[in-house]
Image: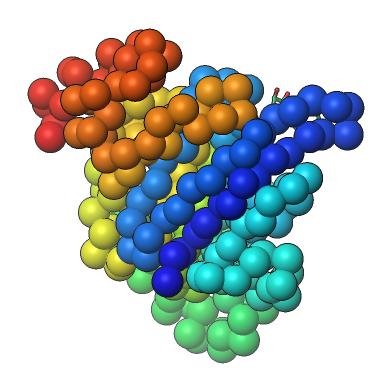
Amino acid sequence: MIAVGWRQVTKRYADGHLALEGVTLEVEPGRGLAILGTSGSGKTTLLRMVNRLIEPTSGTVEVWGRAVSDWDLIRLRRSIGYVIQEVGLMPHLDARANVALGLRALGWSKSARRNRSEELLAMVGLDPERVGRLRPHELSGGQRQRVGVARALASRPELILMDEPFGALDPITRRELQGEFDALRRRLGTTLVMVTHDVREAFVLADRIAVVERGRVVQQGTPEELLAAPETPFVAAFLADAYAVSRDQR
Ligand code: ADP
Ligand code: MG
């Protein structure tokens, strides 16, 4: 079964702008797909169709073999972890409560929620006793992002969506968190769909990359395939920055 599939997906926004045109893509269970492209290319639009924050104009999007339009919307969203750059933590709740936020609705008991949030904070490298008691404004940007990741993983989702999750961090914190998240995701076997304009991020976190340009997928493949044979000048230019990372990290 395919974890996520887009089939001939087109999106025309109400103002007439054609944001996506005939996109077909698949993600296999347990794998990571990076949707890579410049700003405005349609990446976020593609991602937000998976948890049905955006509906396609035509075509279908499937999650675990079933059209998202056939899913119960609440169940669909609860089954998917979602991480965005702004994180969206509740300002009046401490880190532990933020991580546990979605678990209550899923019927977890108070003690189970507490144990799970402490376990998750430790998993993303935060001290549950100290940092767990801090509110978002008392955390650094990197710590907030870690809390966001912990929250997305708390209910053990089989699928996680990330939209430029580490973009606001300084380069060193970003690389560190990317590496830790990647190891964690692979250990848990979680399927990942992520959106980024950072080719290095795509290389670290994804098994496959789909390059989008003005609403179309211009090439897809493994990082090695894209590096070895970029099919358009746009892909080649985009990947130029990746040679350094391919030397350093792969
Ligand atoms: P990306 O995430 O790659 O930067 P988006 O998917 O957010 O791109 O947007 C793709 C294009 O669609 C952009 O040109 C953007 O301005 C346009 N767009 C996004 N949302 C809307 C909307 N609600 N109405 C009209 N145009 C939109
Ligand atoms: Mg975007």
Residue 52, position in %: x, y? 70, 56
Question: Which quadrant does the N terminus fall into?
Answer: bottom left
The one nearer the camera, 131 or 245, is 245
Q: Residue at x 24, y 24 (%)?
A: 229
On the question of residue 108 being in view, the answer is: yes
Q: How many marks?
A: 0
The one nearer the camera, 8 or 81, is 8
Q: Residue at x 40, y 31 (%)?
A: 219
Q: Is residue 109 above or below residue 36?
A: below
Residue 214, position in %: x, y? 60, 22
Q: Is residue 171 above or below residue 106?
A: above
The colour style of the image is rainbow
Residue 194, position in %: x, y? 46, 44
Q: Residue at x 35, y 26 (%)?
A: 199
Task: Say which quarter of the image contains residue 117.
Answer: bottom left
Q: Is residue 114 above or below residue 17?
A: below
Q: Is residue 27 above or below residue 176?
A: below
For residue 245, side relative to residue 38 (left or right): left
Question: Which quadrant does the C terminus fall into?
Answer: top left
For residue 49, side relative to residue 148 (left or right): right
On the question of residue 172 being in view, the answer is: no
For residue 187, side relative to residue 38 (left or right): left
Q: Residue at x 81, y 34 (%)?
A: 13
Q: Residue farthest to the right?
A: 15
The one nearer the camera, 76 or 55, is 55
Residue 221, position in %: x, y? 32, 39
